[in-house]
Amino acid sequence: MAKAINAGLRAAMDDDPAVLLLGEDIGALGGVFRVTDGLLKDFGDGRVIDTPLAESAIIGAAIGLAMRGYRPVCEIQFDGFVFPAFDQITTQLAKFRNRSSGQVSAPLVIRIPYGGGIGAVEHHSESPEVYFAHTPGLRVVTPATPPDAFLMIQQAIASPDPVIFLEPKRRYWEKSEVDLAVRPATGEWELHESRIVRPGRDVTLVAYGPLVRTALDAAATAAAERASDGTAGADIEVVDLRTLAPLDLEPVLASVARTGRLVVAHEAPVAHGLGAEIASQVQEACFHQLEAPVVRVGGWATPYPASRVEHSYLPDAERILDAVDRVLSY
Amino acid sequence: MDEFFDGPLEPDGADDMIRLLSVDGERHTDGEYAAQVSHVTGEVLLARYRDLVMCRRFDDEATALQRQGELGLWASMKGQEAAQIGSGRALLPQDYVFPTYREHAVAWTRGVDPAQILALYRGVDLGGWVPAEHNFALYTLVIGAQTLHATGYAMGVQRDGAVATGDAERDTAVVAYFGDGATSQGDVNEALIFATAFNTPLVFFCQNNQWAISVPASRQSRIPLYRRAAGFGLPGVRVDGNDVLAVEAVSRIALERARGGGGPTLIEAYTYRMAAHTTSDDTTRYRENAEEQLWAARDPILRLRRHLLSIDAADETWLATITAEAADLGADVRRRCLSLTDPEPMSMFDHVYGEPHPPLQRERAAFAAYLAGEADPPLAAARLTGTRA
């Protein structure tokens, strides 16, 4: 996936000379995850800018560059390091278009590797998506697969609005075929479309980013259970949300209308998480279709734990299947 | 106070400040700084005086409008007119300004309609003017945030090849305005670091008006603010902010340096906030009347008036015509302020995004239906029809 994002950045930079990159260690090093590998060499330090170590300045300066007509793509090195830039993102970036009555826009893309599962030290495994999804004026998306990563980074750069682009870092090494000819205008999917990635009859399971893989694994496990012992393993329909703000819940609502049951999974803490928003909208829209309460699976209401116990914090296929069993028990 | 602290303003030159006009109105005409404003004589000099008086009158009118309930708030720049006019009149059309929320006289020099500034403080708009028409960004209320935008904008100017070309109509400088309180903000320090790291065409213009609401500048820094520049690796200069000529001279040097590729400069314009922080503030709780009286005597307008009268550049008749013109401005601003109508509630939904955003569009439609008195509450249930049997 890291290489897919790299290819997407390269395509966007080839297509539009206004696109430039800012971040820490994105030049000679190619970023700590090598997402910008080789771009300095090919585009020069006028467009691949290794900045001093200051996140608020990366975003603030990118806003100024955008006002001058550039299309900055900022890399925040790790999820836990975005907070020094939180003011610039929420009080400045998100509001420019609105407070200027449309006269000023700042079409930044802010790339943030996020989520846990890589055995990292503190502040390197966070899931900060809701802070941004809760801020009007921002768009928040997260790809789950290499082809989506390639397409969505280009779509994000083409967007006239600021986009928080969350990259599921434990999936950086995931491999699949990517059609490098795909461009935003010809993409099969829009940036803000959710999609059903596995059809099923019994339960709707919504996930995004790093947990899409986990959700598919859980669905496969349930399907295998059914096949091996002949009893009723759940037939799980998996939705890859892809877009967190705006939410595209139409596929979710249509799915729940069929299954009557919903589980939402994310790495971020369940409390005040995106699952709460989804559950609320689903109960409002599908009140008569629901056969069971909506159940959420996610991180605990604790700080992200030390890495040796992170697998007790992160939702895995087993915890997701436990939730599936619970919604099926009604 | 310790050894690093300047005492009250000393006579010319003894206080580490560049000054071309003494408090009693005597003009210095020798040296590098004086040469920068050698053209500011005759009609040009009178125009500077007119600027100061007009902006003071606008500011006073705005304060009165707030007292009468026509503005929600007003942040007065009274006492800072010379710092703002001096720097503003040093700008070229292609230069770009990033103001705080108190740069009313700089706005004047950029041709922003004063009534548009009132829209923000009246609560009928979040912005007020079109930045691209004036190369004057919208006001920024989060302290220091705009200095980073200025830095990035200046990086863009560099990438556009609009620095050090020698073309006087192309080479561009950017100015970041901020105050003494802002110098404690991380963003301002980061802006200084980025600006020097990339050698941006940027002037950091700090108006040290000595008070960050109730906190004196001594709480922000143990050394004069301009001396912080050395630590960041850029030139720092302190100018008497109540001397319109000295401010213009220093600004011209810094701006030309920026346009020519010489990089950023920090200017500390030492001035005084003669009014309260805003109309919601109460200075009697934290500063002495004697201090206010001291600075009233150093009023930048009085200083220039003394000079004009002393050299017979103006007489009382001319001064009276300017006062009358300012009164007309006040009346005009008042009339147009009162004509600023409240925005339509539905306008809240405008310009949040550049592309369609379905959840917001649904909220908008639901609220429109509510305002229209339509019966059904805006339940998302309307999105699905039929029930599960």
Image (cartoon, coloured by chain):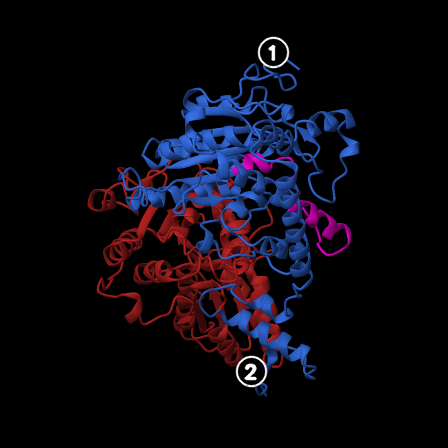
Chain colours: A red, B blue
Secondary structure beneath dot 1 equals: loop
Q: Residue at x 26, y 37 (%)?
A: A28
User: In the figure, B315 relative to A318: above or below?
Assistant: above
Extreme residue in the top direction: B3
Which one is in front, B245 or A43? B245
Disc 2 or 1, which lies upstream in sequence?
A: 1
Question: Can you give x and y, in whole percent of width and height, for residue A245 in the image?
Answer: 49, 62
Q: Amino acid at mark 2?
A: Leu
Magenta segment includes B65: yes
Say which mark, if any, is on residue B384: 2
Q: Amino acid at mark 1?
A: Glu
Question: Can you give x and y, in whole percent of width and height, for residue A86 in the image?
Answer: 52, 46
Q: Quadrant of the C terminus of chain A?
A: bottom right
Q: Which residues are magenta?
A: B57-85
Question: Can you give x and y, in whole percent of width and height, for residue A320 in the image?
Answer: 50, 61
Answer yes or no: is residue A105 visible. yes
User: In the figure, A255 relative to B296: above or below?
Assistant: below
Q: Residue at x 41, y 22 (%)?
A: B32
Chain of the residue that carries numbered disc 2 in the rendered image: B
Extreme residue in the left direction: A42
Say which mark, if any, is on residue B41: none
Question: In this figure, which residue is indicated by the disc labeled 1?
Answer: B3
Answer yes or no: is residue A77 visible. no
Q: Residue at x 51, y 59 (%)?
A: A137
